[in-house]
Amino acid sequence: MAVKTIKLRAYTQEEVRARFLDHMWGLVKYWDELPSRTPTERLEGLMHSTLSLLDEGTDGTDGICAFKVIPHPYENDREFHRSRGENWYTDDVDIAGSLHELVYRPRPAVSIDPPTDR
C-alpha cells in the first residue's frame, strides 16, 4: 500500500487573508445574533473579539495565529509632521498583545495628542 506524502508549507498571503476574513465574518454573525444585547454591547463585543484575535489568535479553534499591529506611515511623514510641529508615527512599534485587555479600561477624558495651533 502506497503512503501519500503531504508537503507542509506556510500559508500564502491570500490564504492568510481568506482565513482572517472568514473568521471576522463569523464574529460578525455571532455578535449580530445576540438579541439580548444592545447594539452598543454587540459592537463593543465585536471590537473585543477582533482585538483578541489580533492579540492572541484563536487558541487553535480554527488555527489562526496572533498578528502584529504596526503603523505603516508614508515615507515623508516624519518630515511633514515635524514641519507642522506635530508628532509622528514610526514603523517599529507593535501595539498588539494587550489591546483586548485595554478595551474596558476608562477612556481618557481628553485626546492623548491634541491638535496643535496652526
Image (cartoon, grey):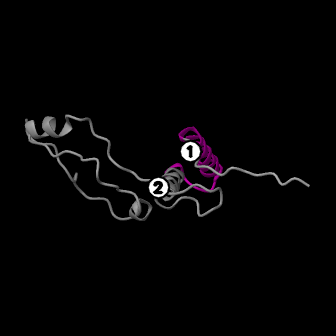
Left or right of residue 108, residue 79 in this image: left
Quadrant (top left/top right/bottom left/bottom right) for the N terminus: bottom right
Q: Position of residue 115 (x, y in %)?
A: 16, 43
Region in magenta? 13-40
Residue drawn at x 16%, y 46% as measured from the top left: 87
Report if residue 51 lies within the magenta region: no
Report helix, strand or loop for mark 1.
helix
- The quadrant where residue 74 appears: top left
Say which residue label 2 marks. 51
Left or right of residue 75, residue 33 in this image: right
Q: Amino acid at mark 1?
A: Val
- The quadrant where residue 81 appears: top left
Report helix, strand or loop for mark 2.
helix
Q: Residues within 10 Å of mark 1 (few under 14, many from 20)?
A: some
Q: Residues within 10 Å of mark 2 (few under 14, many from 20)?
A: many
Residue drawn at x 56%, y 46% as measured from the top left: 20
